C-alpha cells in the first residue's frame, strides 16, 4: 500500500503535461458557472457606492441587497447553472479518465505510456475517445448502485442510532448523526473506488462488458479494503494539508482590495487547484500500481514444442484432416 502510494506520486511527478492539461480542462469548465455569476455581479456592483466597502470585507447586507435589486430569482439561476456544469463535468470526466489512463500506461502496462513514440496529446485523445462510451456506462452504473446503497445504509444506520437521540447524555444525538454521516460517506467511497478500479481494469484488459467490470471492481475493493481505502485516505490527507495551507494564507494575507492583491489571490487559488489535480493523478497512478500488484494479468503459457520426428505428422494432420 505504501509503495503504491509512493509510486503514484512519482507517476504524477513524471507527467507535468498531464497535470497541466487537466488543470486547463477544469479551469475552462469552471468558467461555465463563473462567467454568468461575474456578469451578474458587475451589473449590480458597477454603480453601487458600497462596492469599495465590499473590497475590504464581506457584507451580508450588501449581498441581500444584490439578491433583490433586480427582483430575479438568483438562487434558481445559480442552481440550474451548477447542475448544467455538473452534467458537463460528469461527461467530461469519462473522456479525461480514459486519456489519463492511456498516458499513464493503461493498455501497454508501462509507467509513462509513451512506448509507441506518440505525442502526449495524441495518446491522451486516443485514450479518451477509445474508452469514452464504456466509461460513461460505468459511471451510470456506479451512480445508480451508489445512490441505492447509500440510501439503504442511511435508513438502516439512522434507525439503529435513533434511540441515541433520546439518551440523557446530551452529545448522544450528535454522535448518532456523526455515525450516519460516516456510514454514508464510507459507503459512497466504496462505490467511487469501485468505479476507479473498474476503469483501470477496463483500460488494462480492454474489456467491453461494463456491468461485469464494475462488479469486479466492487469485489476487488471489498477484498482489499485496507489497501484501497488506505491509498485513498493518504491522498485525502495530503489534500487536506493543501487546503489547510490555503486557509492559512487566506487568514494571514492582506484583504484583496487592490488589483495586485486580487491577482495574487487568484494565482494562489490556481496553485491550490493544480495541487489537487496533481493528487488526483497520483491517486490514479497509485491505484493502477496496487491493482496490477494484487490482480496481475494471467501469464500466457506457450504450448510445448513439437518434437522434430512428429512435426511432419502434425502438419499432415492439419492440412489433410481425416474425414
Image (cartoon, helix red, strand yellow):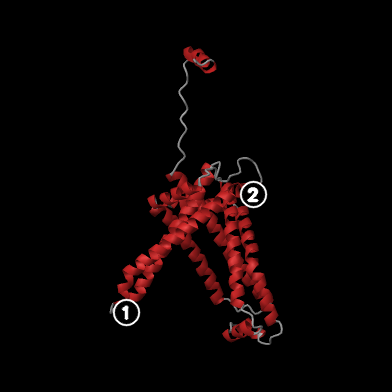
Horizontal side of residue 160 vs 319, given as left or right: left
Provide residue 206's location: percent of width, then percent of height. 54, 43
In this orientation, which residue lies closer to the viewer: 200 or 70? 70
* Label 1 sits on residue: 170
Which quadrant holds residue 108? top right
Q: Is residue 75 above or below residue 206?
A: below
Circle 2 packing at 10 Å, graded few (<14), some (14-19), many (20+), is some
Q: Is residue 209 above or below residue 255?
A: above
In this orientation, which residue lies closer to the viewer: 106 or 180? 180
* Label 2 sits on residue: 125
Provide residue 103's location: percent of width, then percent of height. 59, 48
Provide residue 34's location: percent of width, then percent of height. 64, 70
Which quadrant holds residue 30? bottom right
Q: Which residue: 54% across, 55% down? A: 281
Horizontal side of residue 95 vs 224, given as left or right: right
Which quadrant holds residue 33? bottom right
Q: Which residue: 56% across, 58% down? A: 278
Amino acid at each position: 500500500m505504501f509503495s503504491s502510494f509512493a509510486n503514484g506520486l512519482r507517476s504524477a511527478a513524471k507527467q507535468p503535461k498531464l497535470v497541466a492539461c487537466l488543470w486547463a480542462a477544469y479551469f475552462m469548465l469552471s468558467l461555465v458557472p463563473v462567467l454568468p455569476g461575474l456578469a451578474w455581479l458587475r451589473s449590480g456592483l458597477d454603480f453601487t457606492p458600497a462596492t469599495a466597502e465590499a473590497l475590504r470585507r464581506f457584507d451580508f447586507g450588501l449581498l441581500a441587497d444584490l439578491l433583490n435589486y433586480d427582483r430575479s430569482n438568483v438562487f434558481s439561476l445559480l442552481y440550474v447553472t451548477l447542475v448544467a456544469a455538473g452534467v458537463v463535468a460528469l461527461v467530461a470526466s469519462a473522456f479525461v479518465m480514459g486519456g489519463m489512463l492511456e498516458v499513464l500506461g493503461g493498455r501497454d502496462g508501462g509507467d509513462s505510456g509513451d512506448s509507441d513514440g506518440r505525442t502526449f496529446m495524441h495518446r491522451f485523445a486516443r485514450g479518451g475517445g477509445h474508452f469514452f462510451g464504456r466509461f460513461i456506462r460505468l459511471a451510470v452504473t456506479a451512480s445508480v448502485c451508489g445512490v441505492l446503497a447509500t440510501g439503504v445504509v442511511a435508513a438502516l444506520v439512522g434507525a439503529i442510532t435513533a434511540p441515541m437521540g433520546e439518551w440523557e447524555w446530551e452529545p448522544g444525538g450528535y454522535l448518532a448523526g456523526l455515525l450516519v454521516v460516516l456510514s454514508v460517506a464510507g459507503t459512497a467511497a466504496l462505490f467511487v473506488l469501485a468505479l476507479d478500479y473498474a476503469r483501470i481494469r477496463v483500460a488494462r484488459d480492454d474489456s467491453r462488458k461494463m456491468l461485469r467490470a464494475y462488479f469486479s471492481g466492487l469485489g476487488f475493493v471489498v477484498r482489499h479494503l485496507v489497501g484501497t481505502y488506505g491509498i485513498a485516505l493518504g491522498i485525502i490527507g495530503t489534500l487536506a494539508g493543501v487546503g489547510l495551507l490555503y486557509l492559512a494564507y487566506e487568514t494571514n494575507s492582506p484583504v484583496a482590495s487592490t488589483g495586485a492583491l486580487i491577482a495574487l489571490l487568484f494565482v494562489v487559488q490556481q496553485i491550490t487547484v493544480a495541487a489537487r489535480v496533481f493528487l488526483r493523478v497520483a491517486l490514479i497512478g497509485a491505484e493502477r500500481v496496487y491493482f496490477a500488484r494484487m490482480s496481475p494479468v494471467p501469464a500466457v503459457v506457450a504450448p510445448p514444442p513439437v518434437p522434430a520426428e512428429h512435426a511432419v505428422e502434425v502438419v499432415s494432420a492439419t492440412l489433410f484432416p481425416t474425414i
